[in-house]
Image (cartoon, rainbow, N blue to C red):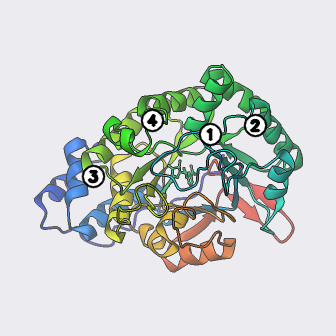
Amino acid sequence: MAEVQVPAPAGRHEFSTDDARLKRIYEKVMAQERLDESDALALYRTHDMLALGWLANHVRERMHGDVTYFNVNRHINYTNVCVANCRLCAFGRKKGTDGSYTMDLDEVFRTAASGYSEAVTEFHIVGGLHPDLPLKYFTDALRGLKQRYPQVHLKGFTMVEIAFFAKLNKMTTREVLIKLKEAGLDSMPGGGAEIFSARVRSIICDHKIDGNEWLEVAREAHSLGIKSNATMLYGHIEDEEDRVDHLLKLRALQDETHGFQTFIGLSFHPDHTVLQHLPWTTGVLDLKQIAVARLVLDNFPHIKAYWQMLTPKIAQIALRFGADDLDGTVVEEKIYHDAGATTPQGLTRQDLVRLIEAAGRVAVERDTLYHQVTRTATSVTVNA
Ligand code: V47
């Protein structure tokens, strides 16, 4: 794989803080020592945002210099029909109710081709838990997409969808993963993890697999050579201990499998959900979440500031708080827009480059596996 050249960290500013807990953490970060649970809690609890940002940025620059990744992708949400009825979600609909939809395979293929003129390198395929779609629908969708777009990476299905397909088809999750991989699945997104805490999960998504099952499906996927991402939904009813517990569980699994590529913190969007009385996250929490993730998840190569969730403006600032990836062009997004997101549905490649360069960073187009992509007027080359 062609390595992206990472210049030495700039180290251009002195670290300073009045927060005694951060001084201790500074020593550890400089010595490249692993942060523990109490360090992670201290990071969440500090009000010294600039010192927190300094620490996370230091680690980010040590790993990636100024390089900031983005990709040219398209989301395909094949159905919003879902049996789970999670309180956190505004996307899912019961079968046959107003606003519910399920794409047939032709619609999946048409959607893949629509809405964006530049050659995409990734389809991001996720949907609700549909009670009637057989596994063949998904294997045919993957085969059909590969046949029509052989150069496009297929990143699809959360751990929750995999567990559901297994139950519905009376198969093991391992058997489902093998079938999907044979049909063309290249990697998996990080969704559905929410928060692993059983107490919180029982309130926000009580019909979903539990945290241990999510981790078990990820372990299985990684053991089959399927890389995945990991997410955490924050800014609802969880507390700092729940967030730290979630991050430490991800870090422990990553020590074992090295199968996670990117961590994405997902800020809760309350509109049109059962939890719509909750306030939206603040900019401070969004930036704090990026920074804590960068510092605690020392074995995760990448931290994504997903612009659709954070807004392009906060995502851009996050590039100085630990994030090295903005995600992609997306084109069409339904899950957060149903929950009140006011961000655009998609950005162009040029928009993403402008955001990154205006933050003083170097924009690098990547494919899903973080190989650099080079474009000319007539070609797209992955430098793998
Ligand atoms: O699984 C659902 C979350 C996830 C809401 O892996 C909500 O590259 C906020 O996982 N407010 C889907 N979040 C998105 C996702 C994702 C996005 C971008 C990139 C990647 C990747 C993964 O969104 C769901 C759920 O955790 N979600 N409802 C809501 N109201």
Residue 182 x, y percent position in the rendering: 77, 29
| Separation (CA) of disc 2 from disc 4 | 28 Å
Amino acid type indicated by mark 3: Val
Q: Nearer the viewer, mark 2 or mark 1?
A: 1
In the figure, 338 relative to 170: above or below?
A: below
Which is in the foreground here, disc 3 or disc 2?
2
* CA distance for labels 4 and 1: 27 Å
On screen, residue 343 versus residue 180, left or right, reads left
Q: In the drawing, does residue 108 fall left or right of residue 17?
A: right
Looking at the image, is mark 2 or mark 4 earlier in the sequence? 2
**Badge number at residue 164:** none
The foreground one among 11 and 273 is 273
**Disc 1 designates what residue?**
129
Q: Residues within 10 Å of mark 1 (few under 14, many from 20)?
A: many
For the residues bearing labels 1 and 3, Cβ distance under 8 angstroms: no
Q: Secondary structure at mark 2?
A: helix
Seen from the viewer's position, the closer of residues 310 and 81 is 81
